[in-house]
Image (spheres, helix red, strand yellow):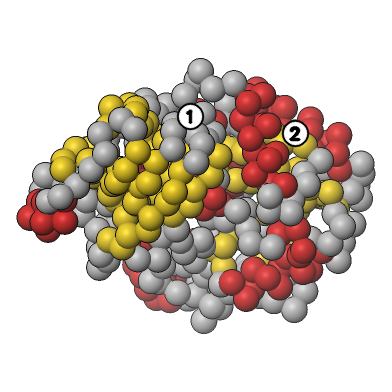
Amino acid sequence: MYCIGCGAEIQTENKDEIGFLPAGALKKKMENDEDLYCQRCFRLRHYNEIAPTSLTDADFLRLLKEIGQHNALIVNVVDIFDFNGSLIPNLHKLTGGNDLLMVANKRDVLPKSLKVGKMTAWLKEQAASRGLKPKDILVTSAKNKADVAELMEAIEYYRQGRDVYVVGVTNVGKSTLINAIIKSASGSEDVITTSRFPGTTLDKIEIPLDEDSALIDTPGIIHRGQMAHYLEPEDLKYVSPRKEIKPKTYQLNPEQTLFFGGLARFDFISGERQGMTGYFDNEINVHRTKLAGATEFYEKHKGELLAPALVNAKLVRREFKVMDKSDIVFSGLGWVRVPQKAIVAAWVPEGVEVVIRKALI
Ligand code: GDP
C-alpha cells in the first residue's frame, strides 16, 4: 500500500518516518475504500501544514546531491542548543558551490544575556572548522514573529531570484519555521504544492516565492548520536527544553562527580578548584558526589534518585584534557563549561557523541 500523495509505502509503526498512518485510521480507510494518504500528506492537503519526516542516510545523501545540481540558495537550519548534534556531515561537499544561509534556531532556550553578536561569531568559527562558509548566519526563535520576518527578508536578499532549499536534521525546528513562513506569507491560502525528487519516492514541498522560483522543504535526517534515542518518550522533554535555561554553577574540587539525572555523568579528575557551569534543561536533576564511589552510587540509585533512567544503554567514559575555557558537550542533552585547565571525564550512553569545543558562553 502506498500513499497516493507522496508515493511512500504506508506504515503504522513510526510516526516520525515517511508513510506513517495510525493503524486505526488505516483500518477505517480500508473499510470505507477511501484513498490512502499518509498522515503527513493528509495534513498537508487539509490544513496546508507540513509535518516533519525523517529519511534514511542513503536517501538523504541522494537528496543532497540532487540539490547540489541546482543553482539555489541552501538554508541549513540547526538547533543552537544542540549545535554539534544538528550538523549535517559533509554538507559543504554535497551542496555543490551553492550559497549557504545558516539559521541557528531555538535561541529562546539559551540565556537572554547571551548577545547575538557573540553567538554568530562563535557559530561562524564552528561552521568554518567544518568546512562551511555560510554567506550569513541568523539566530532565530521559531516562536518569534520578528525573527521569522527577518529570516524571510534574509532569504529574499540572498536567493537572488533562485530557488531555496531548506535542509536540516530532525528536531531542529525546521517544520515550525516553515509553517510560520507559510502563515505570515499567505494567511490560509492553498500555497503548498508537492512534487517528487527525481528518482526517489520522496515528496518535496514547494512554497512559491515568485513566478519562477520556490522555497522547497526537504525531509530531515535522524542524527543517531543524540541522547533522544536512549530515552523513554515521556522523558524527551529533558532533551528539548522549552524555556530559557538557567545555567547552574558548581564550585568543584578535583575528584568530584556530577550526575545529570541517570543520563550522563561528569567527573572532575584533576586541576585547580573551579566553578563549572551546567547548561541543561531546568528540570534535570543534578547530583554531586565523590568520584571514588560514583560508579557504585550510580548502580544503586539509577532510575530513582538519578532519574530519568536510560533505556537499553549503559554509560561509557571518555576523558578530556581541557586547556582553556571549553564546553564538554553531551550531544542533545546540554554541556558543562570548564573555565580552566583540568582533566575531566564525560560519561554518556554508548553511541551518544561527546565533544569538547570552545566555550559558547
Ligand atoms: P523539525 O523536525 O526540524 O521539523 O522540527 P519541528 O519543527 O518538528 O520542531 C521540533 C521541536 O522543537 C518541537 O517540539 C517544536 O515545538 C520545538 N521548536 C521548534 N522551534 C523552536 C524554537 O525556536 N524554540 C523552542 N524552544 N522550541 C522550538
CA separation in Å, label 1 and label 2: 23 Å
Using a 10 Å C-alpha cutoff, classify the residue at mark 2 as few (fewer than 14 neighbours), some (14 to 19) or many (20 or more).
some
Residue 203 position by quadrant:
bottom right
Residue pictured at 16% horizontal, 56% vertical: 295
| Residue at image mark 2 | 152
Using a 10 Å C-alpha cutoff, classify the residue at mark 1 as few (fewer than 14 neighbours), some (14 to 19) or many (20 or more).
some
**Is residue 27 at all visible to an observer of this figure?**
yes
Q: Is residue 205 above or below residue 249?
A: below
**Is residue 228 at all visible to an observer of this figure?**
no
Residue pictured at 63% horizontal, 35% vertical: 122
**In-front residue for pair 218/10:** 218
- Tell me where residue 329 appears, x and y as whole percent: 44, 46
- Tell me where residue 187 appears, x and y as whole percent: 67, 33
**In-front residue for pair 201/164:** 164
Residue pictured at 60% horizontal, 46% vertical: 78
| Residue at image mark 1 | 110
In the shown orientation, is residue 12 left or right of residue 94?
A: left
Q: Is residue 176 above or below residue 61?
A: above
SS class, disc 2: helix
In the shown orientation, is residue 40 left or right of residue 234?
A: right
Which residue is at the far bottom?
A: 1
- Tell me where residue 263 appears, x and y as whole percent: 27, 52
**In-front residue for pair 253/168:** 253
Q: Amino acid at mark 1?
A: Leu
Residues at marks 1 and 2 touching, judged by CB atoms closer than 8 Å:
no
Which residue is at the far left?
A: 300
In the shown orientation, is residue 6 left or right of residue 185?
A: left
Q: Amino acid at mark 2?
A: Met
Q: Which mark is residue 153?
A: none
- Tell me where residue 140 appears, x and y as whole percent: 61, 32
Residue 56 position by quadrant:
bottom right
